[in-house]
Image (cartoon, rainbow, N blue to C red):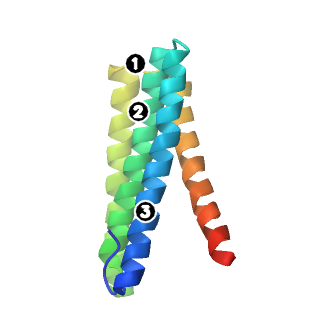
């Protein structure tokens, strides 16, 4: 994932961090989808799942972009990250438009999936940072 110019221990820590973040956020999103489904809100569950998948996919693309520029000079890194950001926005926008206009998912559920997944990732990062301070 994030391998360039990192020692083997650092690379393993970075991979564990990324994997833990993705698995933890996916578990939170999955619990939300299951909870909404059990509540009988299948349209909301589907919208929530789409939002969560967009958030998780966006995070994965960010990890790939950053991993690809570690050790690069500033100009090349800025160029690659800028192109990656435009690519992410285009893909996310296309998926959002398709979800809303074609699949007719619930906008509030989609936004909830986006936000709750992002907040859970931030919470996992903060918990890891606080554990590292001990």
Q: Residues within 10 Å of mark 2 (few under 14, many from 20)?
A: many
Count of numbered labels shown in the rendering: 3
| Residue 34 in sight | yes
Q: Earlier in the sequence, mark 2 or mark 3?
A: 3
- The quadrant of the rendering that contains the C terminus is bottom right
Q: What is the CA distance from the residue labelled 2 to the residue labelled 3?
A: 21 Å
Q: Nearer the viewer, residue 128 or 63?
A: 128
Q: Which residue is mark 1?
A: 104
Using the image as rendered, state which of residue 33 and residue 76 is in the foreground: 33
Front in this rendered view, residue 120 or 75 = 120
- In front: label 2 or label 1: 2
Residue drawn where x is 42% and y is 81% of the image: 10
Tag 2 and tag 3, C-beta contact below 8 Å: no
Q: Is residue 121 above or below residue 75?
A: above
Element on which disc 1 rests: loop
Query: Which residue corresponds to mark 3?
Result: 18
Pick the front one: 95 or 38? 38
Q: Is residue 71 above or below residue 30?
A: below
Residue drawn at 60 percent across, 48 percent down? 119
Instruction: Determine the image quadrant of residue 133.
Output: bottom right
Identify the residue at image location x=34%, y=20%: 103
**Which numbered circle lies on residue 50?**
2
Q: Residue 4 appears at what percent x and percent y? A: 31, 82
Residue 2: numbered disc: none
């Amino acid at each position: 994932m994030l391998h360039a110019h990192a020692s083997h221990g650092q690379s393993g820590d970075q991979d564990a961090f990324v994997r833990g973040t993705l698995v933890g956020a996916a578990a939170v999103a999955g619990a939300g989808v299951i909870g909404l489904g059990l509540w009988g809100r299948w349209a909301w569950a589907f919208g929530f799942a789409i939002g969560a998948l967009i958030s998780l996919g966006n995070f994965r693309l960010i990890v790939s972009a950053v991993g690809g520029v570690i050790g690069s000079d500033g100009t090349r890194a800025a160029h690659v990250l800028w192109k990656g950001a435009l690519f992410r926005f285009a893909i996310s926008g296309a998926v959002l438009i398709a979800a809303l206009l074609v699949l007719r998912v619930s906008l509030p559920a989609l936004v909830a999936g986006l936000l709750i997944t992002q907040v859970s990732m931030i919470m996992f990062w903060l918990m890891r940072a606080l554990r590292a301070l001990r």
